[in-house]
Amino acid sequence: EHRGHLGALAGADGDATGLHHPRLFGGEPAGAHVAVHGHVVHAEARGGLVERAFGVTLREVLYDYGGGSASGRPIKAVQVGGPLGAYLPESQFDTPLDYEAFAAIGALVGHGGIVAFDDTADMASLARYAFEFCAYESCGKCTPCRIGSTRGANVIDNLLAGRQPERQKELLGELCETMLHGSLCGLGGMTPFPVQSAMKHFPEDFAPRSRH
């Protein structure tokens, strides 16, 4: 688990300031505030918040401010916007960090959290975690969220175990659509974002690990 130091802020002018910076709390208009974590050089050493004008690319944030891959291995995927944000592949790292550009690729800026994963990441396991997170946080009021989150984790398990993998992929797609359009709040409605994006951009990670 990677945690930054929230007391540090890399300001728009490059200066380090505190979290009391007026641009964060009702001062002059600010740009994008993002927190870079995960498999990047500065996640532990510097961490904290980066303030830049909207329009800076994800690649610039990862490499100019995050310092690039901490392990020296290629950065495989980046999740932006929290635990229910979409996973973005390297081919989308040049996307400008703004709401419209991210919406155009099926992603969201959210609260600005950015977590980088190098090429050792198992995207199927990360997709499964989205369902686990949803199941843990669900209030249980609506069926798509309450049942769908638990069922989703089971479907991924069956897929990776090689139990009718093509059928499991179909079920996973149907389940995501049901949660996306049938959940009463954003928790269940956003859980499909990391799952669908992981399946779309990293299909090789969803190949069965065993055959039945």
Image (cartoon, grey):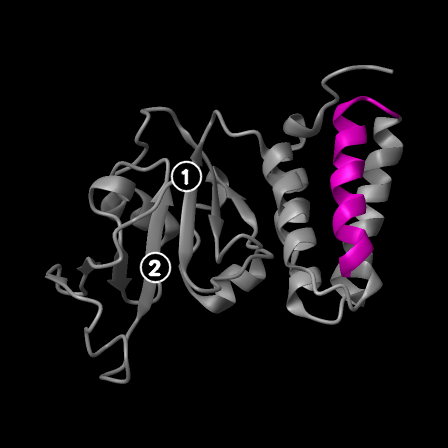
Along the line of sight, which residue is nearer the eye, 162 or 77? 162
Mark pair 2, 1: CA separation: 18 Å
Residue shown at 77% from the left, 47% from the top: 150
The image's mark for residue 50 is none
Along the line of sight, which residue is nearer the eye, 107 or 148? 148
Q: Which amino acid is tagged 1?
A: Glu
The secondary structure type at the circle numbered 1 is loop
User: Mark 1 Cα within 10 Å, few/some/many (few <14, many 20+)?
Assistant: few
Q: Which amino acid is tagged 2?
A: Val
* Residue 138 position by quadrant: bottom right
Q: Count the marks: how many? A: 2
The image's mark for residue 34 is 2
Residue shown at 26% from the left, 63% from the top: 52
76 relative to 81, above or below: above
Q: Which residues are magenta?
A: 145-163
Instruction: Tell me residue 43's x, y (percent).
Output: 29, 42
Tell me the quarter of the image containing the C terminus. Answer: top right
Instruction: Tell me residue 47's x, y (percent).
Output: 26, 49
Q: Is residue 59 left or right of residue 46?
A: right
Residue marked by disc 1: 1
Instruction: Tell me residue 106's x, y (percent).
Output: 60, 57
17 relative to 75, above or below: below
Tell me the quarter of the image containing the N terminus. Answer: top left
